Amino acid sequence: MRHTRQEVMERTQREYRRLDRLVKRLKPADWRRRVPRPESKDPWTIKDALAHITYWKEHSARVLSGKRRPPELRGLEVTQINALIYRHWRNRRPADVAAWHRRVQADVIETLKARPDDWFGQRERGPGWPGDFDGHSVWHRVRDIEAALSTPRAAPEGRLFKKDRLN
């Protein structure tokens, strides 16, 4: 499929608006909610999922700009990079992650604007290209963040809070 700047920009901005609306509604305790992940993986919270989405958007903008990965990430596998992102952002304040998310989106838009119009359609690409700007974000927004927000809150001992019980 050949893409156009307009189509890529629209998809990128639509997903950002959906994600940012969700981020703006998060209460302080929501940022600490665990997202559904296998026990063999790092125990992400909503904040960690947003940091993950944001890093990969930043990475794709860097690639589209013709820049290389930072030296400390060169040669690493995706799972190793994900673990580094988790360790780097896990103790940061939610406000810092939210600000980074918004800064990166501005960089993404500038990166897309800087590419010539004809560049977007020069070659065949998958329908979701560039995936980190929308498809990857959608996946983690829905499967991680929205899923975590839709599960009842657990008390520290693992019991449901009285107001979260079904009966």
Image (cartoon, helix red, strand yellow):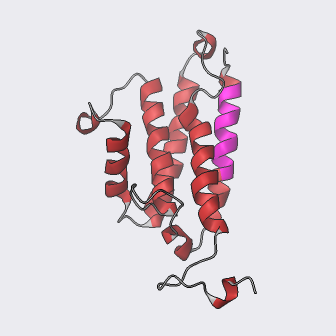
Identify which residue, 76 or 106, lies in the foreground: 76
Residue that protrudes farthest toward the left in the picture: 72
Q: Quadrant of residue 11?
A: top right
Q: What stretch is highlighted in magenta?
A: 7-18
User: Hey, which quadrant is residue 74 in on the image?
Assistant: top left
Q: Is residue 85 rendered to the left or right of residue 60?
A: left
Residue at left offset 29%, top offset 35%? 76
Quadrant where the image shows the N terminus: top right
Q: As displayed, is residue 156 above or below residue 96?
A: below
Residue 88 vs residue 77, the one in the foreground? 77
Q: Where is residue 34 in the image (x, y as percent from the top left)?
A: 50, 66
x 61%, y 12%: residue:
124
- Magenta includes 72? no
Is residue 152 shown left or right of residue 46?
Answer: right
Q: In this view, does 117 lie above or below 134?
A: above
Where residue 158 sits in the image (x, y, percent)? 51, 81
From this view, report whether residue 59 is shown above or below residue 162. above
Count the labels in the image. Answer: 0
Q: Which residue is drawn at 49% across and 57% down?
A: 37
Q: Report the residue at 40% width, 21% height from top.
A: 66
Q: Where is residue 143 in the image (x, y as percent from the top left)?
A: 61, 53
Q: In this view, does 34 lie above or below 71?
A: below
* Extreme-bottom residue of the structure: 162
